[in-house]
Image (cartoon, helix red, strand yellow):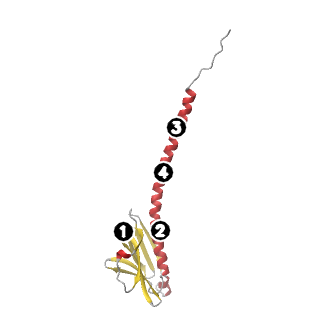
Amino acid sequence: MKKTATPKFHSLPYAFLLMLIGAFALSALALTLVGTRIYKHVNSDAIQNSDAQVALTYIGNKVHAFDTQGGVALTTIGQLPVLRLHETIAGQSFVTLIYAYQGQIRENTLSTQEPFDPTAGEALANVHSLQFSMLTPSLLEATVELLDGETQTLRMALLSAVNRGAL
């Protein structure tokens, strides 16, 4: 009687399959870690750009809202450069002051009779500095320096100056 050959069990194909699954798992883990690091970096840059853009857009909208004869002016209170936005409501004069103080852009609206306290302003964004300049009688420039040293600038045409011939 002839002996039938029993198939031998070889572990090599199973070991190869296990190594292939392990390599795939390690690759997936490495890709996830690299992707997470890239996402954090891009997200932090986006947040900083967002702060600057939000602050400059806010200032631009405020300037355009107050852009009337005598409504927009640059001044210095103490040694603090301030954007002064003036309006009259029901016969009473108010000013909105926008300035940088203690690493923040701040806004403070008060009656022209009230004293100015830089700490009383509402914080809008964290910045290193905020500077204003009048490039021409009808062109206002605001420059924000972020905490990382990056600067962004916004130039705004004052239509009230254009309408009175100060172009």
Q: Secondary structure at mark 3?
A: helix
Total number of numbered labels? Answer: 4
Residue where numbered disc 2 is placed:
53
The mark nearer the N terminus, 1 or 2, is 2
The mark nearer the N terminus, 4 or 1, is 4
Nearest to the eye among marks 1 and 2: give it: 1
Query: Disc 1 to disc 3, how far (Cα)?
Result: 49 Å
Q: Residue 36 has which mark?
A: 4
The mark nearer the N terminus, 1 or 3, is 3
Query: Disc 2 to disc 4, how far (Cα)?
Result: 25 Å
In this view, the residue in front, 159 or 66, is 66
Q: Where does residue 122 sit, x and y in percent of width and height?
A: 41, 74
In this view, the residue in front, 142 or 14, is 14
The mark nearer the N terminus, 2 or 3, is 3
Q: Could you tell me which residue is drawn at 45 percent across and 70 percent down?
A: 55
- Disc 4 crowd rating (10 Å Cα; few below 14, some 14-19, many 20+) is few
* Residue type beneath disc 1: Gly
Q: Secondary structure at mark 2?
A: helix
Q: Residue 133 has which mark?
A: none
Nearest to the eye among marks 2 and 4: give it: 4
Above-or-below relation of 65 to 33? below
Q: Could you tell me which residue is drawn at 62 percent across and 20 percent down?
A: 7
Q: Residue 23 has which mark?
A: 3
* Residue type beneath disc 3: Ala
Q: Where does residue 9 sit, x and y in percent of width and height?
A: 59, 22
The mark nearer the N terminus, 4 or 3, is 3
- Disc 3 crowd rating (10 Å Cα; few below 14, some 14-19, many 20+) is few
Q: Where does residue 10 sit, x and y in percent of width and height?
A: 57, 24
The residue lying furthest to the top in this view is: 1
Residue where numbered disc 1 is placed:
103
Nearest to the eye among marks 2 and 3: give it: 3
* Residue type beneath disc 4: Thr
